[in-house]
Image (cartoon, helix red, strand yellow):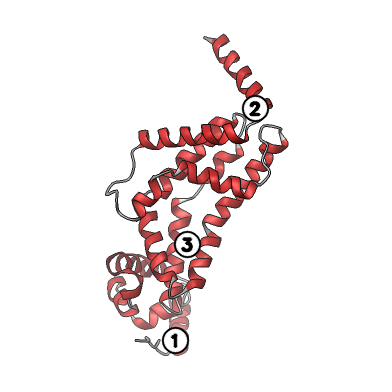
Amino acid sequence: MIETPPNVETDQCGDLLDSLRRGRPAAGQDPVKRSQIIEGARRVFIDKGFEAASMNDITREAGVSKGTIYVYFANKEELFEALIEEERGTIFKNMYDVLDHADDLRETLVKFGKVLALKITSAKVIQAQRTVIGASDRIPDMGARFYERGPKRGHDKLMIFLNAAIERGLLRIDDVDLAAYQFTDLCLAGLFRQCIFAYRTKAPSQDEIDHIVRSGVAMFLKAYGTESLVAEESHQMIAIEAKR
C-alpha cells in the first residue's frame, strides 16, 4: 500500500514561522529531530526489515508526527539510505587511515586487513547488508548506491595504496582492480558468508581474524611481492635482530 504524505508544504510554512518566533531551527533543519527520526527508523528496520516497515511504524517509534517525518524524508527509501549513510560514517570512520602509513608494507596490509575483517563481520554491518540485499531486488538503484558509496569507495582507496606500492617497486601487479578484490576476499576467507547467512551466531574472535588475515597477506605477497620487497623485509629483520 502506498503511503501518501500529508500536506508537507503547509506544515513547513507553519513550522518555519514557529521556528522564527522561537529562535529554533527551521523545518527540516533540526539535527536533534532528524536524529530522533533516524533512531526510530533503525529500531523499526531491525525489527521488521525494510519491506515490512512502514512510515506509520517509524512515526510511532520515533515519537513524531507524520507531517514532521515527511519534512525530513520524502519516503521510506530516502530514510533508509540516510540511516545506512549515518551508520557507515560511524562504523567505517578513519578505517582507511592505516593505509597512509606504509613504511612496512606487510604490517600495513595486516593492520588494514584486521580492521576490515573486524568491521565487515560486526553485527551492525551484517544486519545492514542483509537489509540492503533484501530491498535491492525491489529497488536495485538503492543497492547500487549502497555499493558505490561504501564498498566501491573502499576498493578505490585500496587500489591507490597498491599502486603506490607498485611505484615503490615492492609489488608487481598487472590487474590492480582484480588484486584489490582478491586481497579483501583473502582477509575475509570463510568469515563473511558464514556471518551473512547466520551460520555463525557470534562475530569471529580477534585471534581468528589475526590468523586469517596474516595468512591472506602472506599469500597475497607471495603472488605479487617483488625481490625488492624480499630484500627490504630482510634488511628490516636484520635491523630488529641487531637491536636485541
Q: Find the distance from the CA under tag 3 to the CA under tag 1.
A: 24 Å
Which secondary structure lies at badge 1? helix
Q: Amino acid at mark 1?
A: Val
Q: 15 and 28: which one is in front?
A: 28
Confirm or deny contact between disc 3 and disc 1 (CB under 8 A). Answer: no
Q: Amino acid at mark 2?
A: Leu
Q: Quadrant of the N terminus?
A: bottom left
Which secondary structure lies at badge 3? helix
Specify few, some or many for label 3: CA neighbours under 10 Å numbering under 14, 14-19, or 20 or more. Answer: some
Residue at horizontal 43 percent and vertical 43 percent from the top: 189
- Residue that numbered label 3 is attached to: 85
> Which comes before the other along the chain, label 3 or label 1?
1
> From this viewpoint, is residue 31 visible?
no
Confirm or deny contact between disc 2 and disc 3 (CB under 8 A). Answer: no
- The tag on residue 8 is 1
- Residue that numbered label 2 is attached to: 229
Residue at horizontal 52 percent and vertical 55 percent from the top: 151
